[in-house]
Image: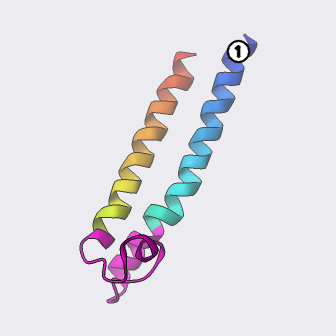
């Protein structure tokens, strides 16, 4: 019983971390991409240079997709236990 509770808490903690990481790495850059004409700068420019082009749209979208998949997988893990 205690092991099941520990897994559920671990899954919930990982879900929280994934969502909290997904907001500044996925949602915020994507909103910035659609609301401003300047598609350079931000967190991804440190990794990929100033001119992001399409990467400014693709990278945040991939982050959001990965976070949603991870949260869904962890939800299945929580319900299985």
Q: Foreground residue, 69 or 56?
A: 56
Magenta residues, start to end: 28-56
Question: How does the figure colour the protein chain or chains?
Answer: rainbow
Residue shown at 46% from the left, 78% from the top: 42
Image quarter hosting the C terminus: top right
Query: How many dots with numbers?
Result: 1
Q: Residue furthest top?
A: 1
User: Badge 1 local density, few (<14 within 10 Å), some, or many (20+)?
Assistant: few
Q: Is residue 40 left or right of residue 15?
A: left
Q: Is residue 67 magenta?
A: no
Residue shown at 58% from the left, 55% from the top: 20
Q: Answer above or below: position of 73 versus 64.
A: above
Residue shown at 24% from the left, 72% from the top: 54
Image quarter hosting the N terminus: top right
Which residue is the site of mark 1?
3
Residue shown at 45% from the left, 47% from the top: 67
Q: Residue furthest left?
A: 54
Residue 10 lies, in percent from the top left, at: 65, 31
Splitting the image into 4 quarters, where does residue 78 fall?
top right
Splitting the image into 4 quarters, where does residue 21 fall?
bottom right
Q: Is mark 1 on a helix, strand or loop?
A: helix
Q: Residue furthest right?
A: 2
Q: Answer above or below: position of 81 versus 48.
A: above
Residue 17 lies, in percent from the top left, at: 60, 48
Q: Is residue 39 magenta?
A: yes
Q: In this view, does 17 lie to the left or right of 5?
A: left
């Amino acid at each position: 019983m205690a092991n099941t509770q520990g897994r559920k808490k671990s899954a919930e903690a990982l879900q929280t971390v994934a969502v909290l990481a997904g907001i500044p790495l996925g949602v915020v850059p994507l909103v910035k991409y659609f609301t401003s004409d300047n598609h350079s700068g931000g967190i991804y420019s440190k990794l990929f240079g100033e001119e992001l082009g399409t990467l400014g749209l693709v990278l945040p979208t991939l982050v959001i997709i990965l976070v949603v998949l991870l949260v869904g997988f962890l939800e299945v893990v929580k319900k299985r236990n």
